[in-house]
Image (tube, coloured by chain):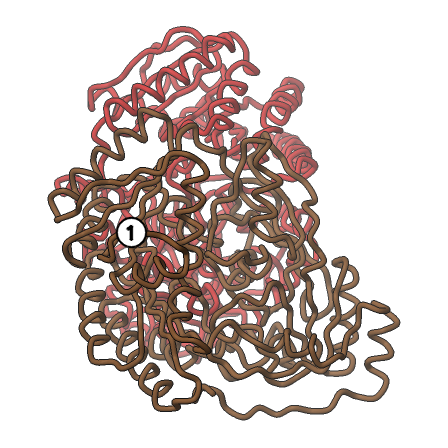
Chain colours: A red, B brown
Amino acid sequence: MTTQQTPHQRKPLPPGFLDEVRAAVGVRLHTGKAILLQHGSSETHFDPVFPDAVAFAHSTAEVAALVRLCIAHEVPIIPFGAGTSLEGNITPIRGGLTIDLSEMNAILEVHHEDLDCTVQAGVRREQLNDHLRDQGLFFPIDPGANATIGGMASTRASGTNAVRYGTMRDAILSLRVVTPEGKIIRTARRARKSAAGYDLTRLMIGAEGTLGIITEITLRLHGIPEAISSAVCSFKTLKGAVDTVVQAIQLAVPVARIELLDDAQMRASNTYSHLNYPEKTTLLFEFHGSERYVQEQVETVRTLAGINGGGDFLWSNLPEERSRLWKARHEAYYAAVGQRAGAVGWTTDVCVPISRLAQCILETKEDLATSTVPATILGHVGDGNFHVIFSIDPNAPQEMEEVEAINDRLVHRALGMDGTCTGEHGIGMGKQRHLVDELGDAVDLMRLIKRAIDPKDLFNPGKIFQL
Amino acid sequence: MTTQQTPHQRKPLPPGFLDEVRAAVGVRLHTGKAILLQHGSSETHFDPVFPDAVAFAHSTAEVAALVRLCIAHEVPIIPFGAGTSLEGNITPIRGGLTIDLSEMNAILEVHHEDLDCTVQAGVRREQLNDHLRDQGLFFPIDPGANATIGGMASTRASGTNAVRYGTMRDAILSLRVVTPEGKIIRTARRARKSAAGYDLTRLMIGAEGTLGIITEITLRLHGIPEAISSAVCSFKTLKGAVDTVVQAIQLAVPVARIELLDDAQMRASNTYSHLNYPEKTTLLFEFHGSERYVQEQVETVRTLAGINGGGDFLWSNLPEERSRLWKARHEAYYAAVGQRAGAVGWTTDVCVPISRLAQCILETKEDLATSTVPATILGHVGDGNFHVIFSIDPNAPQEMEEVEAINDRLVHRALGMDGTCTGEHGIGMGKQRHLVDELGDAVDLMRLIKRAIDPKDLFNPGKIFQL
């Protein structure tokens, strides 16, 4: 459906390959159509593309064995977690073997006293937080979807808490990786910091599986704060809401979450999540800290909101209420896409310096006013990151073109402000042109690294850039 | 002097090379012995090695021109900032051209409202903070020495504030780099986060100039806190001091600085910096925040110190007093080395998970008790990072051997605790064996990257690993 895909060379699997895979993983090798479709589909507008086979791995050693088989037979190899990525990041465009890591879902170690843990790549973030809760710990990175930690590492995910706690780049201490040579390496030790050679950890984070397969992750954790308060505040104007955010960030108020949903998104979310909020531009806040410190943060932000045309703060201090609020936020994508029955979604993902955020959002809102495709705006605005979610009629090809043009204009608006084409979704298949627009010759350096590490171009080929 | 150096191939400069360099930088090309010695010496125990020539660059374009000359003539090229590194990181062991960036010291842009700035690589951290002070901003990374920002980036420096504000890894938004192809790239935009392809920013940070030359750095800044309080607290025992730190970190008290100096270091610092503190294990604290929030942090830490045998907190709330205190901390290395006239220094640099810190320091202190070489312990203990500073008689070769053995035991003690051989000094020449002990096959992946990016091995050759 998307016009951004280009045809890719696809070779049949070599004879005997599947027998060798079956010898390695037994009944966990699948070639049935339903499972192939599931591993070639996406949450957004990319056409499904089937892998040739799917193998469910149960250990790092098994992944390494599968990698060695794929290398020997020159078969493309695609790591797969929860399949929640948004830029076609796990689409097997040249076929090959998808290695599904979702059954590698053991939480291997929790070092309570060091505030860290080591998990297998298939652990999902909600599972991890359920496990940690009794120990008074939590893992803050929250991209919305209940993604796997491995997938989140591979796309350098972030989400609602990043303004306070950073992104996957900051959250990871160390990785275990199966390299394209079939070796198992550990990228770092468990120390909080290190100056020991090249930062392979950060090189693998955000590499979208093109440089190796992440099988284990050591994560930084945080103590559950003594006090957590959530609030909802509606604004007279979009500008007033954005200005409130910008001023809070400039005053260095350590808000844990500060999310913007525009009027259209509030309408969609009210319907989808059975809520009853005013259908105006809205900020959702979460404050973490000691009782006194949370109170201090709240006072500052409430004052800023008042100055900028914000209404009363509606509080959600009970855990159930908070869950309901943030569940609605997590459902926002489905709410936005689901405005039209049978629609497919497309979400943009720019991030700009905070001083340019108001202008970027307001110009985008103006641009959307001319569009025939329903669209909402929401974002992790404390970072300068926001999304437009389009609800596209799959039977109206001009809608896809229209959205592509709006997205192009948005990306170039953000680049013009020294921003990025992707705050957290990655490049995948969808943003390869934009990556070049953003970083120019630096992309050649990425290609050089890719060719050196994966000379046969077998690891998630065709992603991030064309070689 | 050190036994860790191995002989290196050193070729004479090709005929005509210096004429071409002189055509590029004019009188800023130097071949006088004094300046060569200055660019081949180190703050620690490595023997001086002369480069063939030193060129002072004044712009990124000039650096690129010099790089292209060096590539064409296959001349090694060593970037140089302030020369404050501690592992022989800038020693020109194969000769060649040292490019001194210290005159590229312009602060190019300060984006007050975005809390970031862009500086040339030769800007020093004190210069930057002097410039920022009037705008209510500061750059927190403080390795002690008044290093250049480019050098700090290249060694992934951190220091006293890292426990609260992170390391150079966290502090940098984007780099301008001259690659070994002679191209000028920018590794990222100015957005707070991005998922746009491989993290070239982090790859260059800590690469010690082996993958290219950093010429400009975009840094995250912080607002100067409303309240800053510094305190000094002596402890009955080393263990009590370390336990205080560990408990404060586990309670997630956001202390801005928490530095440990053992009794020997306090003795040396009292002498060197004309102070009069008790010569017992001491913690230096700094707290940042609002008045109320600082007070809350102080209460918690004071309670912990009391439980662990700490004495009264001696406060330094006036800026002059604070400066005096932290000046003494910054002079600690020179104080420790200067215990013996004419001595040379050697500093270790392990970092371990915080739960292992007490054991690691106590075992190290025991080990030092058997040594004939004067030694002190100090560290950025909130991160699990500490140093032993030896004061070595250069005319007693057995002292160097003794220290090397102690350092070896210390590194392996830290590795046994899943720590790292270097928290912040880098690998340079001194820790290449230890890097392999720490990361095994992952070092091969580093070599692969180095060979791909710098196939002629011209960029700061012989550092981090042998190719």
The residue sitting at 68% across, 74% down in the picture is: B98
Residue annotated with mark 1: B277
- In the rendered image of this protein, does residue B37 appear above or below residue B59? below
Camera-side residue: A367 or B232? Answer: B232
Amino acid, disc 1: Tyr
Which quadrant is the N terminus of chain A positioned in? top right
Q: Nearer the viewer, residue B81 or B167?
A: B81
Placement of B112 over or under A456, stated as above or below: above
Q: Residue at x 25, y 61 (%)?
A: B263
Which chain is home to disc 1?
Answer: B
Q: Is residue A201 left or right of residue B171?
A: left
Left or right, A262 with reference to B387: right
Q: In x, y percent, where is residue B71?
A: 74, 77
Structural crowding at the residue carrying mark 1, measured as other residues with C-alpha within 10 Å and reported as few (<14), some (14–19) or many (≥20): some
Q: Residue at (70%, 49%) from the top-left corner?
A: B106
Q: Quadrant of the C terminus of chain A?
A: bottom right
Percent x, y for residue A60? 28, 68
- Residue A67 in picture, x, y percent from top left: 38, 72
The correct choice, above or below, for A78 with respect to A322 in the image is below
Total residue callouts = 1
What element does badge 1 sit on? loop
A396 or A441: nearer the viewer: A441
